[in-house]
Each structure stands twice: as C-alpha cells, then as structure tokens.
Amino acid sequence: MNCIVIDSQPLTKSTIERLIGKTHNLVLTGSFYSVNEAKKIMSKTNVDLIFMNLQIADKESIDFIKTIPDDIFVIFISDISSFQTKNQTDMEVRYFSERFKKGISNAQNYQMLIKNETLNKTDDYFVI
C-alpha cells in the first residue's frame, strides 16, 4: 500500500516513517509537514493510506480531510513525543507499535472491502 505521512512534529513523523519502513507491505510515497505539500503528491501519485496528525486543527487541514477520496484510509495519529523520551518504557513502545499494527490491519481490510465493493464508508479511519 502506498502511504504518506502528514505531521508537523518531527519526532512523531520520524517514528511513523521508521515503522512504515519496517512494514513489508507499505511503501512510503512521501512525508510532509503540511497538507499543502501532501496535496501536490496526491495529485500525481496513487495513495492508499494517510497517516495524519490528529492535532492539526487549522482550517486547511480540516478542509483537506473533507476532500480525501473514500478509497483512501486515514490513520489519525496523536503527538507521540511522550514515547520519545529517554525514560520511555518498553511497555510504551510496544503499546504504540501494537496500535500501529492494528491500524495497518484495519487499512488492509478496508482496501480488501473496496476491491470487493462492500465498503462501509463510515469506517474509513483509525486512531493511534
């Protein structure tokens, strides 16, 4: 699945990028700090999955979310800088990694439903 990351927090963005890199069926098509940058690549490239910071609340981001096509799954991520401290515990890292895996599983299931045309359009997102 082709995916992009939209997050203004460098630590969160790099963590998601690393997790994508470790996931065999994901291809990181682009990583962006703003929706304007992401729009450019989305007009040129097929995107199946978007990782987007849940805390981006400006008007541009909200308008962007409304225009995402139904066949693209969105995983909203929160700022995970609390997991990025020197004192991070293995439990915290495992928890985030498991949530990531669950989100990817939901995205894969969503893509299969799209292919079979049995899509429930109310379930096109997941929150990490």
Image (tube, rainbow, N blue to C red):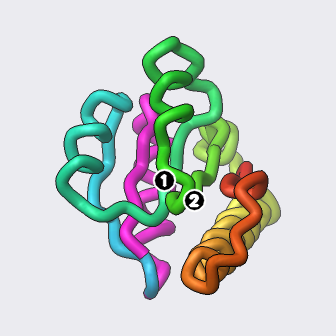
- Residue drawn at (18%, 54%) of the image: 44
- Above-or-below relation of 45 to 86: below
Rate crowding at label 2 as few (under 14), some (14 to 19) or many (20 or more) other CA atoms within 10 Å: many
Q: In this figure, which residue is indicated by the disc labeled 2?
A: 73
Q: Is residue 63 magenta?
A: no
For mark 2, give the secondary structure: strand
Q: How far apart, in angstroms, are the residues tagged by discs 2 and 1? A: 6 Å
Task: Locate residue 76, reporting x and y percent.
Answer: 63, 45
Q: State the residue position of label 1.
A: 50
Q: Residues within 10 Å of mark 1 (few under 14, many from 20)?
A: many
Report x, y in % for residue 26.
Answer: 43, 76
Q: Residue at x 45, y 69 (%)?
A: 20
Q: Earlier in the sequence, mark 2 or mark 1?
A: 1
What residue sits 65% from the left and 72% below the top?
Answer: 110
Pointer 2 and pointer 1: residues touching (CB < 8 Å)?
A: yes
Q: Is 37 left or right of 110, judged from the image as shown?
A: left
Question: Is 38 placed left or right of 112 in the picture?
Answer: left
